[in-house]
Amino acid sequence: MARILLTGGAGFIGSHTAVVLLERGYDVVLLDNFSNAARDVPERLRRITGMTVPLIEADIRDETAMAAALAAFPVDAVIHFAAKKAVGESEADPLLYYDANIVGTVRLLSAMRRASVGRIVFSSSATVYGEPDRCPIAEDAALRAANVYGRTKLVMEGMITDLVRTGVMDAAAVLRYFNPVGAHPSGLIGEEPRSEPANLMPYLCQVAERKRPHLNVFGADYKTRDGSGVRDFIHVMDLAEAHEAALRRVLARDGDFAVNLGTGVGYSVLEMVAAFEATTGVKVPYKIAPRRAGDIAECYADPSLAADLLGWRAGRGVEDMCRDAWRWQSRAALTNGE
Ligand code: NAD
Ligand code: WQD
């Protein structure tokens, strides 16, 4: 079976993808610098899967370390999750993002070339579409990232597809995630924001946990069903399964493709609050707050290309997302002795 290196493999989406790959028989190697992940993730993966996963502690910007990793563990492909991902932080410190994301990816790709690893699956984001002309968003929509983080994703997408086009690499999948939420149903792994969460679901869960007094609903005057923002929330386990489908294609065929990974259905912020309360029985106090700078009214995917190319569709609903996010959040609180 193929051996796959997961950069950022101890992070939120990487760790869930590791579970799916291990359960489907792949050899998995994790690489992470633990800048945004807990050190016991490999141990938690062992508890879920019964398998011990090799872990390399390294920074993708360290090309020597990356080359050493690929020499120690020859792999058939890389799934490249490692990145910085906070939009606000990227606007506050653009050079940090150019370095971590763009320079880091250049170094990774150079090390891959030296090791003759020519196949990659890349974590991109719906943020590359900026404010879309219409929803659902198809892959041929205009690409116009509106912030530094989004621009780094566009640059990295371009670098990777250039390398395939010019024959430096064999195959690449560019996966544009919409809004990943939820957690593994075991409650053993999930999203672990290090500081005040910027994203809706982690913040909502911390309000439910009574760690924060209320949720600020950023804007109730958008032209949407109920005035609050609409997004395409996708369960992280659906996303993890999509990576395996993309990987299968990348291992089997040369060439590159970019696909949206979403459900195709938008839910509003207020609908997510209601779904969370209905699923978990826990009240989530909220206040209507001003719009957040840079936000758009609605954003949801046309997921049909992923279905055609990969034979993959998201199957889990908002109840699964809320239930699993809450199981993870309440269990993590217990473990931390909070
Ligand atoms: P995450 O922060 O949980 O995971 C990223 C992992 O990469 C972390 O474990 C972190 O420690 C590691 N890392 C960061 N910089 C590194 C470096 N220089 N060297 C080595 N390791 C490094 O984030 P996530 O939500 O799992 O996101 C994974 C990928 O998906 C990222 O590329 C992100 O931009 C992209 N993405 C995420 C979302 C989302 O909402 N979560 C949406 C779209 C795209
Ligand atoms: C969703 C909705 C907010 C927090 C971001 C990135 C994107 C991608 C996913 C990485 C919006 C509202 C939020 C809160 C709220 N990340 N909200 N109160 O902005 O769609 O996408 O994360 O690639 O690039 O931009 O996600 O979860 O921050 O917000 O009302 O406390 O929830 O206004 O309508 P977003 P989000």
Image (spheres, grey):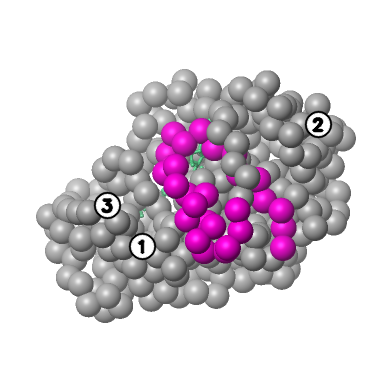
Earlier residue among tags 3 and 2: 2
Instruction: From the top left corner, tell me how far across and down residue 5 is, in percent.
Output: 68, 44
Q: Secondary structure at mark 3?
A: loop
Circle 1 sits in a helix, a strand or a loop, which is it? helix
The answer to whether residue 205 is visible is: no
Q: Is residue 290 left or right of residue 85?
A: left
Q: Where 285 falls versus 103 (above or below)?
A: below
Q: Quarter of the image holding residue 253?
A: bottom right
Can residue 263 be seen? yes
Q: Which mark is residue 336?
A: 3
The three-letter amino acid code for the residue at tag 2 is Ala
Q: Residue at x 49, y 52 (%)?
A: 43
Instruction: Describe residue 301's horizontal placement relative to residue 122 as left or right.
Output: left
Q: Which marked residue is nearer to the observer: mark 3 or mark 2?
A: 3
Nearer to us: label 3 or label 1: 3
* Residue at the image position 58 percent from the left and 63 percent from the top: 50
Q: Which residues are magenta?
A: 25-52
Q: Position of residue 185 (x, y in %)?
A: 45, 70
Task: Find the distance from the CA under tag 3 to the CA under tag 2.
Answer: 41 Å
Residue of label 1: 328
Q: Where does the C terminus fall, quadrant-wise?
A: bottom left
Q: Which residue is mark 2?
A: 115
Q: Residues within 10 Å of mark 3 (few under 14, many from 20)?
A: few
The vertical placement of 85 against 315, above or below, is above
Residue 144 vs residue 3, the one in the foreground = 3
Vertical order, 8 against 299 (above or below): above
Q: Residues within 10 Å of mark 1 (few under 14, many from 20)?
A: many
- Asked if the residue at label 2 sits under 8 Å from ligand 1, the reply is no
Image coords of residue 312 (percent x, y): 66, 69
Query: How much space separates mark 3 and mark 1, taking CA atoms?
Result: 12 Å
